[in-house]
Amino acid sequence: MDTQIYMEVNNIMKTINIIGIVLVALLLIVLLVVASTGLIKIPVLTSIVGADHAPDLGVKSDPGLFESMLEGGGITLTDPSGNYCLDCDIKYSNPGAMDIYVTSSELTSYLQATNNEKGPLKDIQIKLGNNNEAEIGAYLDLKDRGVNFAGPVYAKGRIVKGSPATLRLEIDKAKAGWVPVPGSYLDQGENELEDTINDQLAKMPGLNIETLSINDGQLHFKGDFPKTASAP
């Protein structure tokens, strides 16, 4: 894998924020495996085939839901929401107990509020299902970050608890643009990204995952998690 592209993926993963960390992982797997295949050098498809906007999973964003999600989780963002993009400098602190249920619309609203202004991922949609399954789609633009890729990305899979401080990924399928990512590359990327995510989780003070489940279109997290995030 090209070293520059791998480092770009790793930098993106370093700053994934609060609840979104476990689900944005599904989307970033696409970038990793596409870098491995060389498909990242393919020109972006035209708007005729819908390659100039994020996939529509039918999940709506609402600023009011963003605020209610923060309140429900007891989460404090000390800086404007637009500062919390995926590769912004975010500091976590104040770990404490959390027992929260989050809907697809709440999570989508949170991720759009914190990424649409500065982040490489625009118009993120999360569709939660059952048995820890989720779909994620967005428009990913890395041209300003030195990587020649801009286009819609999509992934579907499961996120499960590995230990009180780690996660496991089980990716079923992914697309970069409208190009499916082959299964052999999914396996390779899944393992590498899982290691990267768990390295990042190890840096969160007081993290303790008791329950992580997705059922009936809701994400349930119970345990201890940083309650304050700063991104000056």
Image (cartoon, helix red, strand yellow):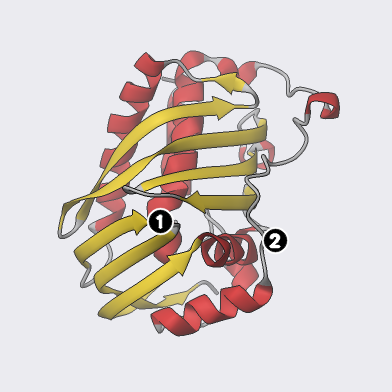
Residues marked 1 and 2 touching at CB (< 8 Å)? no
Query: Upstream in the sequence, badge 1 or badge 2?
Result: 1
Residue 92: image location, x then y, percent: 37, 72
Tell me the amino acid under the disc marked 2: Glu
Circle 1 residue: 21
Closer to us: 207 or 50: 50
Disc 1: CA contacts within 10 A as few (<14), some (14-19) or many (>=20): some
- Residue 65's x, y, as percent? 59, 74
Quadrant of the drawing holding the C terminus: bottom right
Is 118 located above or below residue 34 in the figure? Answer: below
Residue 79 appears in the figure: no
In this rendering, the answer to whether 175 lies above or below 104 is above
Left or right of residue 121: residue 5? left
The residue sitting at 45% across, 24% down in the picture is: 33
Q: Is residue 11 left or right of residue 212?
A: right
Q: Secondary structure at mark 2?
A: loop
Residue 153 seen: yes
Secondary structure, mark 1, is helix
Q: Quadrant of residue 29?
A: top left
Amino acid type, residue under disc 1 in the picture: Ile
Q: Which residue is mark 2?
A: 117
Observer-nearest residue: 217 or 33? Answer: 217
Considering every residue shown, the one lying at the far right of the view is 48
Q: Residue at x 66, y 35 (%)?
A: 152
Q: CA distance from mark 1 to mark 2?
A: 18 Å
11 to 7, vertically: above or below: below
Task: Please identify the quadrant where the N terminus is shown.
Answer: top left
Q: Residue at x 27, y 59 (%)?
A: 212
User: Is 45 situated left or right of 218 in this image?
Assistant: right
Tell me where residue 69 appears, x and y as whole percent: 50, 76
Foreground label between 1 and 2: 1
> Residue 187: x, y in percent?
32, 23
